[in-house]
Image (spheres, rainbow, N blue to C red):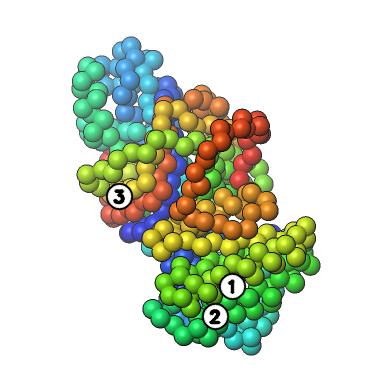
Amino acid sequence: MRIRDAAVASAMFTVPAAAAQAVIAYSGLEIAEPLAGRGGRSGSVGRGGRAICSLAFVRYADGDLGPYHEFAVAFLVRPPGTPPPSGRGGRLRAMRDVGAFIHWLPVNQEFTLECGRSIWGFPKELADIPMDLAGRVKRCAVRFGGRTAVEVAVRPGAPMPGGAGAPKVDAYSCLDGVTRRTPWTLTPSDVRMRPGGAKVVLGDHPVAEELRALGLDRARALSSTTVGHLSMTFDPAEEVRP
Amino acid sequence: MRRTALVAGAARGTGALAARRLAAAAWDVVAVDTDEAGLAATAFRSPNTHVRACDITDPKDVADILGVTGAVHRLVIAPALPAPEPPVDEAMRDGFLGPAGLIRAALPGMLERGAGEVIVIVASGASPATAAAAAAARAYIEALAAEQRGRGVAFRCASPPAEVPARLVLDEIDRSLARPGEVHVAPGRRPLRLAPRRPRRARASAPPR
């Protein structure tokens, strides 16, 4: 499946690893813990360790699933079957192999909803997703029946030089008890990044409650990114048994 | 209530991207052009995009399409692919008379509602005839904006250089819509700022519409 033109704004937050692990426990996957806490050497998530939660909003203008808006809540996870890294160097090296577990993926069009759920097992649900990706500050809201679940604003960053290649990431999902891995290749351009730079306001949706429990309401972002033009490919999903 | 956009020149380039972006934002989009294959590509897997073959230089086609859409919230007119050296009458018909006729047909519905957006993207002046048509379209939009000031309809006319990507043209138009009263949009050109910036007034963080 190919996306020929999309635009993205995203922000990464550090969250308590143990709490994040509890949120994604249903998948059987293990949260990646790039920032150490106490303990955690036996393979379990350490006390006081920090994990990464990413919030992103995407406008798909041209792609095989038609045009639509999407909001994503994702956590960085270790590939299934890999042991937890030890030491600061090990943790940093392990970040090269991390995947993105897609915990929530509201969209605003029905075709992508059906395809995303049935082909890749992505946790898509239908929402109103107004978005402004043209302004200096990129803004998005996710609403259900007029009630706001989450609002995110991302401020502009500094231009980044073009990458040498297309980053490859494994996207993980878990729907109806089945965990899947989807190889995902991204080709971004017009990329801007900055430390901090994002504001999150949470509403009254169950996922918003989960994010609030992780400390994300009005939290300071680790970093934020905007991508003016992004093309992507998604390979077929395969079932994994963590 | 879903908003309706009529996008002319939607089979390719900036018009196609404008139609897709509006469809992504859940507008009801009526995409028109004379190129039916191009329209089909624009509306690919977009149930809220409706295509209609239409020559906007033909008053009957224009009346038919407005009869189908009713009053629209946004009218976008993107340039057709101009011939390298079109005759003056052809360039004026495609670049000025056609767009002006479509605007005249769509405007009463907007004025009646007291809200609307008219966006015209003119072709870069590759030939004297094309440049003359673009200048006429710019002057027409400017005069219309002055004539209809205060009646709730925003007018924008963008004149992008050929090398500016369509996505940047549309981003600049979107930004300009947040600045009331601005008519001319010049994507790709940044005016030299000599005076120091005035401190901005604090503004409540407003989510998108």
Q: Position of residue A231 (x, y in %)?
A: 34, 54
Check disc 1 and report the residue beneath it.
B136
Q: Chain of mark 2?
A: B
Left/right placement of residue A28 relative to residue A87 reads right
Residue A187's label in the rendered image is 3
Q: Residue at x 34, y 33 (%)?
A: A76
Image position, residue B193 (x, y; %):
52, 40
Looking at the image, residue A13 sits to the left or right of residue B27; the answer is left
Mark whose residue sits in front, 3 or 2? 2
Identify the residue under disc 2.
B92
User: Is any atom of residue A216 visible in this view?
Assistant: yes
Placement of B133 over or under A200, stated as above or below:
below
Q: Amino acid at mark 1?
A: Ala
The answer to whether marks 3 and 2 sit on the same chain is no
Q: Secondary structure at mark 1?
A: helix
Q: Which residue lies at the image location 44% right of the left edge and 82% below the top edge?
A: B86
Q: Are marks 1 and 2 in contact (CB under 8 Å)?
A: yes
Q: Residue at x 59, y 86 (%)?
A: B58
Q: Position of residue A158 (x, y in %)?
A: 39, 35
Quarter of the image with the C terminus of chain A is top left
